Amino acid sequence: MDRITESKVIGVATPRIDGPLKVSGSAMYASDHHFPGLLYAWPVCATISNGTITRLDTGAAEKMPGVVAVYHRENIGKLYRVPPSTGFTMIIDEKRPPFEDDSIRYYGQYVAVVVAQTVEQARAAAESVTVTYNKERPNTGAKLLGTSLTTDKPEEKSKRGDTAVALSAAKVKVDEVYTIPVETHNPIELHASVAVYDGQRYTLYETSQAVVNHRDVMAQMLGVPPEQVRVITRYLGSGFGGKLWPWPHGLLAAACARNLRRPVKLVVSRQMMFQSVGHRPAIDQRIQLAADADGKLTAVQQDYINHTSMLDDYDEGCGEVTPFMYSTSNLLVTGGLTRRNVGNPTAMRGPGAVPGLFALESAMDELAIALKMDPVQLRLKNEPALDESLNIPFSSRHMKECLTVGTEKFGWSPRTPQVGSMKRDGLTLGWGVAACSWLAARIETEATVELLQDGSARVACGTQDIGGGTYTVMAQVVSHETGIPVNRIDVVLGDSSLPPGPISGGSWVTASMTPAVLAAAQNAGKALVLAAIKSNGSPFLGKKQEDIELVDGTVRLKGQGTAGVPMTEILRIANVNSVSGTGKSDGTLGASKPKFSFHSYGAQFAEVTWQPEIARLRVSRVVTVIDAGRILNPRPARNQIEGAVVMGVGMAMFEETMYDPRSGAPINNNLADYVVAVNADTPEIDVTFLDYPDYELNALGARGVGEIGLAGIAAAITNAVYHATGIRVRDLPVRIEDLLIPASQSTVVS
Amino acid sequence: MELFELVTARTIPDAVKAQAKSSAAQNGADVRFIAGGTNLIDYMKLNVERPKKLVDINGLPLDRIEKTADGGLKIGALAKNAVVAQDATVKEQYAVLSQALLSGASPQLRNMATTGGNLLQKTRCVYYRDTATGCNKREPGSGCSAIGGYNRMLAILGTSEHCIATNPSDQNVALMALDAMVHIEGVKGQRSVPIEEFYLVPGSTPQLETVLESGDLIAYLTLPKMPAGAKSVYLKLRDRASYEFALASAAIVMKQNGGRIDFVRVAMGGVGTKPWRSVEAEKMLLGKPATASNFVAAAEAALHGAKPQSQNGFKVELAKRCLVHALGQASQGA
């Protein structure tokens, strides 16, 4: 593909075009939509996590003020499952439609839904529905290793050489188990669905990171053709993966609207956000590393188990990064699932890689200590020349430079490896490092670009802006191609009736959307040239198409310097309102014989401060160096990485969904008891982008930066914690109680 | 949340009269005073509090902070936490109170929350807030779900087999160390209760948290004059750096004379079922030099009777470190 190396807008720090709407409160989020006759739905949630409903009494609720209907298994009407699919379509994690049977498999499972005139009436009535259960002992056990799996044995995910032989022969070894608790996404925007049904067509205002998939799934589950469903998500108050696939509340809202022929709004409460819209599963990982005396890895083995729900299989895929991260002749990754009475887990920012790297990069730190080797040097020493798992070249990998630039920016060289040996202002310092990676891919995308007589352009794509800056980047790409300024470009997205675009997941939007938008803009330019050479009165009438070019919004003869006719003039002469072009790009994801291994890379350096006298540990500084291809807009890109670092502080230090062992309820189901990082916990953050274009992925060389910033952070912090305290925390999060243990009593690799 | 009536009290006797008809004085009361509402409204939304009537007392003249004739300070029950925290006399004479207030909640909440409301701040035990579970404080006789459940945040001092809920306030820990007096207007007139006697441990009646009876309105607090040369300090330890309740906190007032401690008050937060004053620690310190070993001995004495639950054993050690560090700070006049 043609490489685009120069641009006046690509790579230029550009403010978000949707910023003014958001800060003024005028951006219409899903739950902001209101329609005449709108009703409010409030689900009734199971208060057990395992058992069956023996009786559901809606009598009192139905008589309450404002109540229009109470739906449950017997009167909700037909709801279907999606058919099994092998491709990347029709994706839904919780496949059982709500109310399908009387079994309760997780706490908070919806058992009924009340529809009323006001949300307060709906909620009050929902609380008056009495449900009797046959209750059985739930299993929400946090310990996963050694419990029964969904398969006879763990599945082999990647293998080369013989790790067993290499491990037994090794001079230096690490063999430890690392665990991650359930983490709940908790975007500030609650999941919401406003469903409008006109007797034939559904219009669903949704909190969706994937409007096209959402449309396809909802059409199936409602039993109507996809043309009769339109899903709209103009703005998202983030999602972190939790809004990728539909959840049962969306189908409930649509079914209520169908049954009542009235618009229905259902906003999931914060408590329900902990129950029925996904979470990162609990994960146990055993990592075994072996190295020769000078630090060359001879074996890497990762065995992970994650929990999943009682009905559906969710595989966290913790071995995503492990097979190509380091050079080693012997490697084995296995994975298994174990069932718990929990809502369905789902992808959470950097699924697989983020938890996988916590374990792998912690183990690498332990190995460096065992080898008495600098942890940066250990990683540099094991840099692979190619993707050894697939025996193909990397499209663009600058891992070593991430590490070396990071050591300079952080000021790593004065580091003394002895625990607790570094001090500043009366505080003990800990410095830790971790390498990281996240996959890069294109997925199939279509887009249209329209050039209008008033000098503006309109670009449309059925993707979403999760808050990461997609609106602005789409405008920049069109501006680059057409010369029309960014502020004259109308970006339309978040609508399933638009040309199908990528899901806002996997950090794939930028890489997938840009080639399609570029092609669409180029084709729109060709349509303009056609108007220029075919319209009476045009100075280019009768010229050959190949002799005309479009430069900075003007049409001119090739090689004629500045003389040209503005686009608007051509359209006025032609008397057309607009010309348009369509663009498509194909996908790389799931290619059977990939030519390149596409990934982003990074190095994370963390500093913690430690006051043993009061067991106070704070993350004070993070330096992050990211190799994520060409950065199209440094402002939102930096914002993505900074946000990910803060999320990483939460993951390392605070976040854990606790289940009551008796009821199976996620018991810290609110933002006071589920502790996330607040402003005061935000360290000083230094973000560097290496900015090497990945031209094998697309003409602009862009990859996407949504997830890479979180990868590795937790390990960099726990490695720093060890350096400061001598305590190796292998079970996230790092809690005060972990650090109260005298250092002499903690297990360390020596 | 359930339907309720909102009435406005024009005078203190009006307020007292309105609440005197309540079914109960405390948990489960069907008539409640409302001031800042930062705690009550939360629990009404969760159906933990279900008052039929709210008596708005914000119009009552109880928001003044003024010096008393004997050199102490009078703080109106309606004085906002933010105002008290920034009051010049409080900052200068009663630093521990300013520090405690500023370590709690957020600026927005402190702008709404009042001194009297904070005195009655409810526990943050997750089972108290979850009406699907048993809780003896919310529903006497329904059992304590926290024992054997999620109890990491809960109390290790003053607990009973019926309740282990922590009093979450920072303010009240400082008030314990300052020997505050609570002045109450009630059906039978005015009375004053030392803060030491104001709070109750749960025992077999965890629904009763204070000595307040139906019709009782907290009017104001008084703080006695601080001993000349006394230093005070509040230290709060928690998971994150801000906007979280204490895992352990300490409020210390200390005066030294001739190398010996001749006045000391020690109170702890985050560890007790009520704001916890440790007379035992004070006894260990009085008349002794302000040394690290004496602080450690005081901390040992303070936590001597601690009864940890399944998840909060660490609080014993954490509270000790908190006390030792805070005592050190107070001894240096920090």
Image (cartoon, coloured by chain):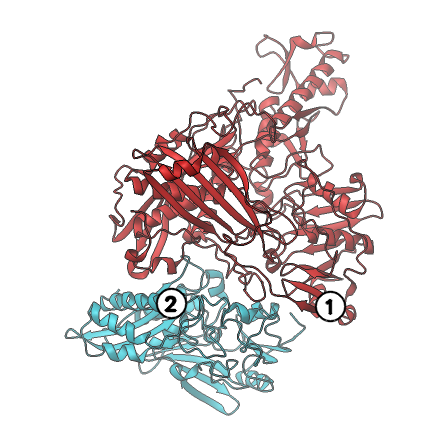
- x, y percent for residue A476: 57, 29
Question: Quadrant of residue A208 in the image?
Answer: top right
Residue mark closest to the camera, 1 vs 2: 1
Q: Is residue A352 left or right of residue B69?
A: right
Q: Are dots 1 and 2 in contact, CB under 8 Å?
A: no
- x, y percent for residue B74: 39, 78
Between B53 and B278, the one lying in front of the other is B278
Residue assigned mark 1: A54
Q: Is residue A402 above or below residue B296?
A: above
> What chain is the red one?
A
Between B113 and A273, the one lying in front of the other is A273
> What chain is the cyan one?
B
Q: Is residue A103 visible?
A: yes
The secondary element bearing badge 2 is classed as helix
- Mark 2 falls within which chain? B
Which residue appears farthest toward the bottom when viewing the image? Answer: B188
- Mark 1 falls within which chain? A
- x, y percent for residue A722: 33, 49
Q: Is residue A716 visible?
A: no
Q: Identify the residue at horizontal 59%, vertical 27% (top origin).
A: A477
Estimate the spatial distance between the alpha carbons at disc 1 and disc 2, rounded to whole Å: 43 Å
> In the rendered image, which quarter contains the N terminus of chain A?
top right
Q: Amino acid at mark 2?
A: Lys
Question: Quadrant of residue A266 in the image?
Answer: bottom right
Q: Is residue A563 left or right of residue A373?
A: right
Residue assigned mark 2: B315
Classify mark 1: residues with Cα within 10 Å, few (<14), some (14-19) or many (20+): few
Q: Is residue A521 above or below residue A328?
A: above
Q: Is residue A351 above or below residue A588?
A: below
